[in-house]
Image (tube, rainbow, N blue to C red):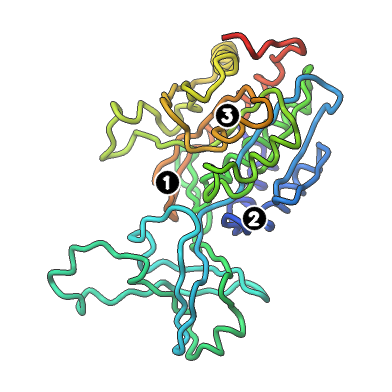
Amino acid sequence: MLSDQSLTFLKRLLDTPGPSGFESAPARVWRDEAGRFAEVRGDVSGNSIAEVNPSGSPTIMLAGHIDEIGLIVTYIDDDGFVYVAPIGGWDPQVLVAQRVRFLGRDGDVLGVIGKKPIHLIKQDEREKASKFTDLWVDIGATSRAEVEAVLRVGDPGVLDARLLELPNDRIVSRSIDDRIGAFVVLEALRRYAESPGAAHVVAVATTQEEIAYRHGGGALVCASCIGPQMALVVDVTFSSDHPGLEKKELGDHKLGGGPVLTRGSVISPVVFNLLEQTAQAQGIPFSVQAAGRDTSTDADAIHVAREGVATGLVSVPNRYMHSPNEMVSLRDLDAAAKLLAETCRAVPADIDFTAR
């Protein structure tokens, strides 16, 4: 299982606010930890890069995005109420009555999301879903000037939900998607550093996936500058082990059932086979997910970077995605990190990624 040091790092990483485009605080946490065992640097897009065995070959990129969904201030009215827009994909129903932590100019600013009380909503409107335009944030201010002393338009925020530990090695956090991926790639690099193979391995905490993965975001920038021959992307996927989901649509992926390996159009068959064979050889439980088109992850940008990168996707089953209470299993994080580290060790220097 994960060491006490790794668990302490994980909790600190998940609780540090950093929505897309504003990831500097969790990025610092990640780089501080990476500096214990790797060469570390950053880039202009905010990506954090840690490498081990720089003279090795081939170069393998391990990518997990460190951003989370959040909110951004769009307007402050004369009475001191704050209006916001989404950073990333939100179901507005999730936001009703939540607490907010804004990243203000002089520190955090707390508030609550307001909505008209049920008593005052007309009967024919009660069944309608809330929209962003129906909501506001109340920080306790009484005027625009009072708000503008601590907040300004363009300031980001997150829901004020901290990590929660539950039975059966499960944790809950608002930022599991996909700060958990940034954690796993660094944990894998830590394990690889203990006994490196032939490969030069670079772990990257990428930025802006939640808002820019279709255009590449930080992952495309990083893949272009690192120039890997192979990439392993870590993200979350929908667990199908709770009520209301169809396994025939999503596959059979359980919390505690191990990582999910994607097989499909953007995934290199060479890399998929490496992952599958390593998991089988190491006794790591896993399931397989099909992706007939794109994957909606950083893999979509990385696999077409430069002259093309042989890319694999390893996902962690996640319940309640894009909510304040995303849930994963620590056993799956451990298994995913082990799979990545052992796969990197198994890659020979003369591997041919063009084999189909």
In contact (CB < 8 Å): disc 3 and disc 2:
no
**Where residue 130 sits: x, y (%)?**
29, 65
Instruction: Please say if 307 is above or below 323.
Output: above
Q: Nearer the viewer, mark 3 or mark 2?
A: 2
Q: Is residue 321 left or right of residue 25?
A: left
Secondary element type, mark 3: helix
Secondary element type, mark 1: loop
**Where residue 351 sits: x, y (%)?**
71, 11
Name the residue that disc number 2 marks: 23
Q: Is residue 240 left or right of residue 220?
A: left
**Where residue 187 sits: x, y (%)?**
67, 35
Q: Nearer the viewer, mark 1 or mark 3?
A: 1
How far apart are the alpha carbons under marks 1 and 3? 19 Å
Instruction: Please say if 316 is above or below 111.
Output: above
Q: Amino acid at mark 3?
A: Ala
How far apart are the alpha carbons under marks 2 and 1? 19 Å
In contact (CB < 8 Å): disc 2 and disc 1:
no
Q: Quadrant location of residue 102? A: bottom right
Numbered circle sitting on residue 321: 1
* Mark 1 residue crowding within 10 angstroms, few (<14) / some (14–19) / many (20+): many
Which quadrant does the N terminus fall into? top right
Among numbered discs 3 and 2, the one appearing first in the sequence:
2
Say which residue appears at 62% left-offset and 30% top-offset: 337
Numbered circle sitting on residue 336: 3
Among numbered discs 2 and 1, the one appearing first in the sequence:
2
How far apart are the alpha carbons under marks 3 and 2? 24 Å
Q: Amino acid at mark 1?
A: Met
